[in-house]
Image (tube, coloured by chain):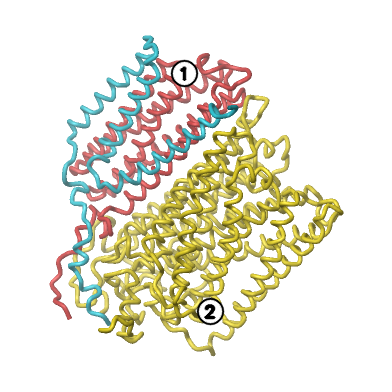
Chain colours: A cyan, B red, C yellow
Amino acid sequence: MSTTDTTDVEAYDALPTEPDQTGGYHPTEVLYVKIAIILALITAAEISTYLVDWGPAHLPALMVMMVVKFALVIGFFMHLRFDNRIFTWVFIAGLALAVAVYIVMITTFRYWQNL
Amino acid sequence: MTDTAVTAPTEPPAGGHATSTGLSNEKLGMWVFLSSECLLFGALISTYLLLHDRSVEGPTPKDVYDIPFTSVSSFVLLMSSLTMVLAVSALTRGDMRRNRLWLLTTALLGTIFIGGQVYEFTSFVREGLGFTTNIFGSAFYTLTGFHGVHVTVGILMLLSLVGLSLRGNLSQERAETVEIIGLYWHFVDVIWIVIFTVVYLAA
Amino acid sequence: MAITEERPLALPAADGGDDDFQPLGIFRRPATATGWRSWVTTVDHKRIGVMYGVIAFFFFLVGGSEALLIRTQLARPGSSLLSANTYNQVFTMHGITMVFLVVMPMAAAFANYLLPLQIGARDVAFPRMNAFSLWCFLGAGIFVNTSWFLGGGADGGWFAYAPNTGVVFSPTHGLDFFTIGLLIAGIASLVSAVNLTVTVLNMRAPGMDMMKMPVFTWMILVVQVLLVLALPVITVALILLTLCRLFGANFFDVSQGADPLLWQHLFWIFGHPEVYILILPSFGIVSEVIPVFSRKPIFGYPFMVASGIAIGFMGWGVWAHHMFASGLGPISVAAFSLSTMFIAVPTGVKILNWMATMWGGKLQFTTAMLFSIGLVGMFTIGGLSGVTHAVAPADTQQTDTYYIVAHFHYVLFGGAMMGLFSGFYFWWPKIFGHFLDEKMGKVHFWLMLIGFNLTFGPMHILGLQGMSRRIYTYEEGLGFDAWNMVASIGAFVIAVSVLVFLANVVRSRRGAADALPPGPDPWDARSLEWMLPSPTPAHNFDEIPTITQLDEFWHRKYGTDENGRTVRIAATEDVTQKGDATDVHLPSPSYWPLVVALGLPLIGYGLIFNLAWAVPGALLVLGGIYGWGLEPADDDENPPHHHAPAPELEAGAEPGSTESEEAAGD
């Protein structure tokens, strides 16, 4: 039986580690509350588009604010900014694919039809 | 034969056995699942976007939406994300009581949100927008209903965690379990962020 | 060299386990190792794989019988064997069965059995979820097929275009069985996909980088990612249709403002990645078989991996080529036509690489090799007709004719099925400990190849001559008669070949006791599963090997001498494992996955017939999930989420891969 197999603890040690699973940089509770306040403020701004006429900026502004809130929750509350890159890749893969595929689908309904 | 002194294998992810990436199986599994949910809600949202203005009769979005009301319930759900991270944070520190407190608060906020949805649905029905009334109704109720079911499942999971904690089975080492359920909860909140903008405010 | 663990082997504990253990849940975990109960509660990926295979093969016979009915009906013009209505049900169920109940689960059978072995793991990441996927799939398959006895099968085609599949035009319950059954099957596949993705990413043996994994493992990984991303889309489509059919929603009611194209988009956004889900596992199988029987490594391993990933990626950009004739408009059609042409490239890379692997190799034409070469040939033909479909103007003539039927049967039967049969012959000795008879295997192959080409070859001609798809009969004198008869004869030749295969299975099993045992490595193969005894022991590896290169096992057997020639450097018995390790901790069996899976079809029957049925179904699901979560972890000395104290490792012992958290984790 080969002696290089499982006694190669060095090889096993060389596996990538993620030291900051729950250690490493971790947002403090204070930071979480700050993020929550920012989210609340952005939400207030979003709601103001209902009360005040933002004109042609209405839709783009809403989209931007939605994306910012999205990114804040994903990045901070879901810890994606501080976790292993693999999680980010996994999630972004689904998100990017969904956005791309559904935008294409929707545009084939609204545009390109009778040219 | 090589020597027997052994250094522990690669420090496993907190609470788990060693993995090739150093990440825990359960957490990775949850992120893969959430990736899948992007496609699910994307399809429902796209369906809504395509169909909401194609009704031939019956109420339209502008007729029924109560933005102030929905704003309040959206805010409630948003804040539940804060209480969720505070719950995780508490358990990571070993503070079981705080953990339970924040978990319960999160579940409560979620329940308030669901209550708001129920109220919203019933008032829409009273105003003449049922599930089968028109294509806007079908699309609206399906999208928000699916989201509501996800929130409800989340509330059940949170309450289950509180139950486990009360029995003494939710120890500090199991903080990752709460974190993983937190991921699900935040995701459901994030979907609502999109729905609130795209369905309600953009109308 | 035994693993030092405190706990005895979990599986054969016939005495029911430790008496002083206080479980969290109410019921202790089952502990039988033999008999039907051990199969029903198993979480062993190998047993689950075998069950997937058996069930899938059973459905292959069902779907094949449906095919024979179709071909008998179409053998002659004006036949009245099947009414139009019945014919619709038969061809719909044939498609549903073959796609969802045969090819997908058969690939799952191989994936489940081989994936952990090929990456050097003891099991998948979530063993109980693995069992759940199996039972969920079985429930879905039975559920869909009970439609035959409960009002008729689904009759809208496997693609179920709405509004034709709404209640107005399809009033029987057949399509409800379709939508709900596929939703349940979708849950099975999604859960399995998450499971296998995490397994490949997280449970590889030390030293096994991603680019040292076998091509089969890579293809399975791509398939799982495709499943994770594509299944939700059809889930939504099916839910919309179910809500329309059962609850009066208006999604596909044109009079209410709906657009039928919504269904088509949602279905094909899933449907196109789905066809790559169907073929990639067979591509993976062939990529294992051809190198072994060419005595050469796979040509261009990085390109094989990259092309698989490229196919998975590009597969998302071509779906509307199924909709060229639906009124999309010229710009959409042109865009999708272009993207469809591009996707031929990575597949072409694979075909060329397989041929390059064989070129200059020392070829051994075993049955497995014949089927693999069959795939290469037949898939090329199917792929070429596919390229002709990509040319949108040409497709306008081809679509909805038998030319399309020819194409997809060449790629799915000539491609996917032949690849799966290749896998059967190749891995049978590993799984069952005896060979399938090679002589009968060759009869099977040639009969199948000839029958297959007789059946589907003429369909190219029939299609271009204008024979429509999905018609229950045709008039005589249109020029279709002769080729239809040929095709029908071919179908029965295929049927005979399948009988030969079945006879081979039975005969080989009967003769196993007297036959020469295959041993661990009968084919002189390359990947890790061949390091282990045949049949594979329950615990897989005595010791998890450390990997230093691609085809690690091969390189332990063969090196190069000073002239650069390949020479044998170790005897088989020195590089294979004996399978005699004791004290390996394995995840304990569980019956909760079965309980939860049982509830889902009940909910389905409830939705269709009487909500009273849905209540026990929901209770089973909910209660089952809680039972599952509260079930005692299978390692009572290491409570969940403590990692085991670093054991004193002797030489040859295995670095810390305990499954103590498996139970609580999955």
Q: Label 2: few (<14), some or many (≥20) within 10 Å?
A: some
Image spot of residue A42 (x, y percent): 29, 21
* Residue C82: quadrant of the picture: bottom right
Q: Which mark is residue B37?
A: none
User: Is residue C56 visible to the viewer in this orientation of the structure?
Assistant: no
C156 left or right of C264?
Answer: right
Q: Is residue B65 above or below residue B174?
A: above
Residue at image location 19% in from the left, 58% down from the top: B11
Mark 2 — residue? C365
Q: Chain of mark 1?
A: B
Report the side of B79 relative to C54 (left or right): left
Looking at numbered disc 1 in the image, what kind of residue is underneath it? Answer: Ala
Circle 1 residue: B203
Placement of A103 over or under C182, stated as above or below:
above
Secondary structure beneath label 2 = loop
Towards the viewer: B117 or C141: C141
Q: Is residue B77 visible?
A: yes
